[in-house]
Image (spheres, rainbow, N blue to C red):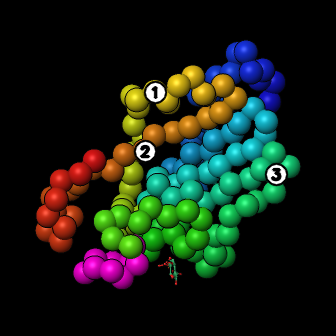
Amino acid sequence: MGHSAAVWDYRAATEITKDWNGIDQVLLRTLRGSSARVSLHGAQVTSWRNEHGEELLFTSSKAIFKAPKAIRGGIPMCFPQFGNCGSLEQHGFARNRMWAIDENPPPLPGNDSSGKSFIDLVLKSSEEDMKCWPHRYE
Ligand SMILES: O=P(O)(O)OC[C@H]1O[C@@H](O)[C@H](O)[C@@H](O)[C@@H]1O
């Protein structure tokens, strides 16, 4: 990619694209050539490729990347419940909401961002979700 560790610009290694349903997804690349893809639908990690381009995550070919279905596969956010251990939908509603990019995230701990890339996503409680889970969160 033409980056060197001395001038690593993680923002240049972060690209926002749309999936086939028009939903924003974030592609993150590292200096060494590995990458991850995160959908704003559920903040779900849908791909993680190593520096050889090999996919390390399973995402079902039957996955529907669109509400009201949560994405099946990858790394889901299970909140505020896991599985069916509660009265909410399977694994909670967070994986079936549109998350937002936090433009002013707190810095990474230490000085460990060289060659890496990252994105901070945020989900805030909504009046609608308060009806079934009456707690504020962010
Ligand atoms: O199928 P979903 O709703 O995407 O959930 C993902 C998986 O979550 C796990 O907790 C279940 O044991 C699996 O059966 C399930 O497939």
When the figure is inspected, residue 78 is found, relative to residue 120, above or below; the finding is: below
Position of 28 with respect to 126 (left or right) is right
Locate residue 121, reporting x and y percent: 43, 44
Q: Which residue is mark 2?
A: 121
Q: Which residue is mark 1?
A: 107
Q: Which residues are magenta?
A: 83-91
Q: Considering the numbered disc 3 on the image, is that residue within a helix, a strand or a loop? A: loop
Q: Considering the numbered disc 1 on the image, is that residue within a helix, a strand or a loop? A: loop
Q: Which residue is mark 3?
A: 53
Crowdedness near tag 3: few (<14), some (14–19) or many (≥20) residues, C-alpha within 10 Å? few
Crowdedness near tag 2: few (<14), some (14–19) or many (≥20) residues, C-alpha within 10 Å? some
| Label annotation for residue 28 | none
Asked if one can make out residue 68 in the rendered structure from this viewpoint, the answer is no
Q: Earlier in the sequence, mark 1 or mark 3?
A: 3
**Any magenta on residue 85?**
yes
* Cα–Cα gap, marks 1 and 2: 14 Å
The reply to whether the C-beta atoms of the residues labelled 2 and 3 are less than 8 Å apart is no
The answer to whether the residue bearing label 2 lies less than 8 angstroms from the nearest atom of ligand 1 is: no
> Which one is nearer the viewer's eye here, 78 or 1?
78
Mark 1, mark 3: which one is toward the viewer? 1
Identify the amino acid type marked 3: Gly
Give the prevailing secondary structure in the magenta stretch.
Answer: loop
Locate residue 88, reporting x and y percent: 28, 77
**Any magenta on residue 101?**
no
Identify the amino acid type marked 2: Leu
* Cα–Cα gap, marks 1 and 3: 28 Å
Where is residue 90, by image quadrant?
A: bottom left
Where is residue 5, by image quadrant?
A: top right
Q: Quadrant of the N terminus?
A: top right
